Amino acid sequence: MRSANLKTYKPSHSNVQSTSKEDIYQLLLAQLNSLLDDDVDYIANTANFCAAIQQNFHFHWVGLYRVMGEELVLSAFQGPTACTRIPFGRGVCGQAWEEKKTLIVGDVHSHPNHITCSALSQSEIVVPLFDSHGNVKAVLDIDADIVNAFDTLDKDYLEECVALLAKYY
Ligand code: SME
C-alpha cells in the first residue's frame, strides 16, 4: 500500500481537507481510463493526457518528448514554451531514455546533466514510456517550481499513468 503524502503540490481538489495526493492520483487514473481512446489519433490522446495531469496538480510544466532517431523531440505539453530537441543521454530526459528508468531530480540546479528550459523550474521527474518490446518511445517530463516536489509515490503513479498511455501510443 502506497502511503499518502501531500506535502508539496496542492492538487486542485485540495479544498477538500481529507483529499490526499494518492486520492488525486486515483482520480487521475480513472480520468485517463475514460479519456484515452483507441479511436482518436496520437495528438488527441497525448494532449488530453498532459492536460489531465496539469489540471489535477498545477505543475509548472507537463509534457512529452518523443523518440525520433537519436534525439527526443517536443510533443504535446502544458505550460511555457520549451526546448524542442534533446540528444540521447543529454539532460534529465535524455538520461532517463538512456538508463530506461524514471529519474527524480530534487533540485535541478545541483544536477549536472539538467537542461534549463525555464528559469522557474526547481525540481523534475522524467518517466520513460516503453513499447511492448521494452524500447523507449517517449518520456513524460514534469517540472515543478519548488524543490523536492516529487517522491516515490509520484514515481509509482506516474509510471502507471504512462503505462496506460503506452497502450494508445
Ligand atoms: N529539463 C529537461 C529539459 C526539458 S524541459 O524541462 C521542458 C532536461 O533536463 O532534460
Image (tube, grey):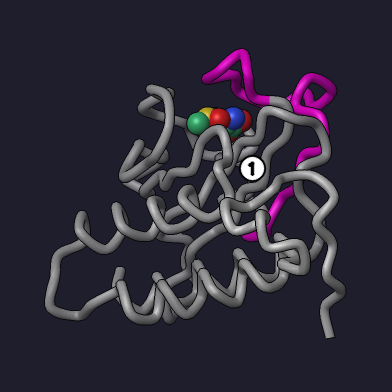
Pick the residue in front: 16 or 3: 16
Residue appearing at x 41%, y 40% in the figure: 72
Residue appearing at x 36%, y 48% in the figure: 66
**Where in the figure is residue 31, as x and y percent of width and height?**
42, 74
> Relative to 160, is 116 above or below?
above
State which quarter of the image contains the C terminus.
Answer: bottom left
In the image, is 59 to the left or to the right of 77? right
Residue found farthest to the top? 119
**Where in the figure is residue 111, as x and y percent of width and height?**
79, 27
**Where in the figure is residue 102, as x and y percent of width and height?**
68, 57
| Main SS category, magenta section | loop
Residue appearing at x 84%, y 23% in the figure: 110
State which quarter of the image contains the N terminus.
Answer: bottom right
**For the residue labelled by badge 1, is the local secondary structure a helix, a strand or a loop?**
helix
Q: Is residue 24 magenta?
A: no
Q: Which residue is mark 1?
A: 95
Q: Is residue 112 magenta?
A: yes
**Where in the figure is residue 157, as x and y percent of width and height?**
65, 70
> Quadrant for ligand 1?
top right
Q: Amino acid at mark 1?
A: Gln
Label 1 C-beta lies within 8 Å of the nearest ligand 1 atom: yes
